[in-house]
Image: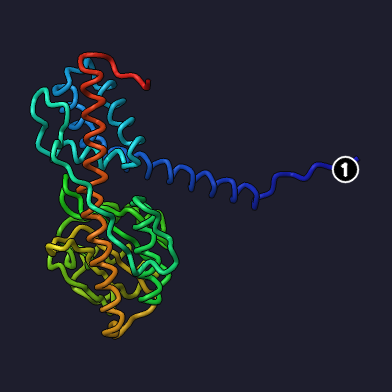
Amino acid sequence: MSESRPFGHGEFARGESAEIDRLGAEVRHLRARLRAHPLISEAQGILRERYALPDSESAFSLLQRASQHSNVKLRTLAGAVTLTPRPDPGAPLWFPRQARSSEPRLTFDREGRARSGDRGAVLGAVLSRTLVVVDADMGNVQTADRAEGGLRIEKHTGLSAEFVDFFGHVGIEGTSCARAAREVTQVTVRDVATDPVFSEPARRVILREGSLACHSAPLTSASGRCVGMVSAHLDRTIDGLTPAQVAALDLIGGEAGAWLDWYGRTVVVSALEHLHALGRRHRGRRGSRS
């Protein structure tokens, strides 16, 4: 009969570490929900008033259904509801003259990662190609937050939970990506430890990540508006990027920016139109999933 092995210190430490990781992930998830809550609540209030819905739960149900139907993030759709002029009262269509333009081509996506109409896949392709160009293993993609201003992280790789939590939403000061967005130009930080672009809290988090240099490149619409940002973090200081690297990132930024602009004008608008149809159908009734 074999003897049972006592639960050793190593197993206890590993179990404790796993529990800490689980709790940390839960806290970050709750923080993300809290950040999105005011915007979604505002959208729920607008929908309740617009379609005479009996409660916030009914409004949330319609938002969720339209989000899933169109594969548009709930937060993105809620933001569009709050920012888009309301439809004419009683109008069967929110956008009666909507014309869906063709999806822009992404020539930089050599690996074919970006699937048609898939925003997440496109942002993933932007990040993947940028890291190849810059020769880095860490990076993130942000999109312009139309509702709150600033930039919000959408995709990342090689970065810790602490980093993603700290930089989940950044304003107009204190980071290289904020400066790149404000000036709509590429920004190279050759040495994170000494560059004045960072606030001290931001610098400490970046250095703890092992990032000694970084480069931020804006994603721009055809009109020159910054609609997003891609940043690469390097584990070494650098003298700068080559003209060929800068040109490659300009191409990525222009094509990805045009795609995001198209997505907002077509896919998100179609999601709003579907939401309007749902709202008219359920006017004055408690929301359902039918």
Q: Residue at x 43, y 70 (%)?
A: 137
Which quadrant of the view contains residue 279? Answer: top left
Residue 248 point in image, percent of width and height = 30, 76
Residue 162: give x, y in percent of width and height: 37, 55
Task: Note whether 79 is above or below 185 in the view shown.
Answer: above
Q: Quadrant of the N terminus?
A: top right
- On-image quarter of the C terminus: top left
- Along the line of sight, which residue is nearer the eye, 72 or 46? 72
Q: In the rendered view, how is the structure colored? A: rainbow
Work out whether residue 228 or residue 192 is closer to the camera in this orientation and state it. 228
Locate residue 130, reporting x and y percent. 35, 70
- Callout 1: 10 Å neighbours few (<14), some, many (20+)? few
Q: Is residue 270 above or below residue 13?
A: above
**Amino acid type of the residue that numbered disc 1 sits on in the rendered structure:** Ser
Q: Is residue 50 left or right of residue 75?
A: left
88 vs 49, nearest the viewer: 88
Residue 2 appears left or right of 11: right
Q: Is residue 88 left or right of residue 217?
A: left
Res. 35 visible in picture? no
Q: Secondary structure at mark 1?
A: loop
Q: Closer to the camera, 277 or 61?
A: 277
Residue 146 percent coordinates (x, y): 16, 48
Q: Quickly name the residue at label 1.
A: 2
Residue drawn at x 15%, y 59% is 172
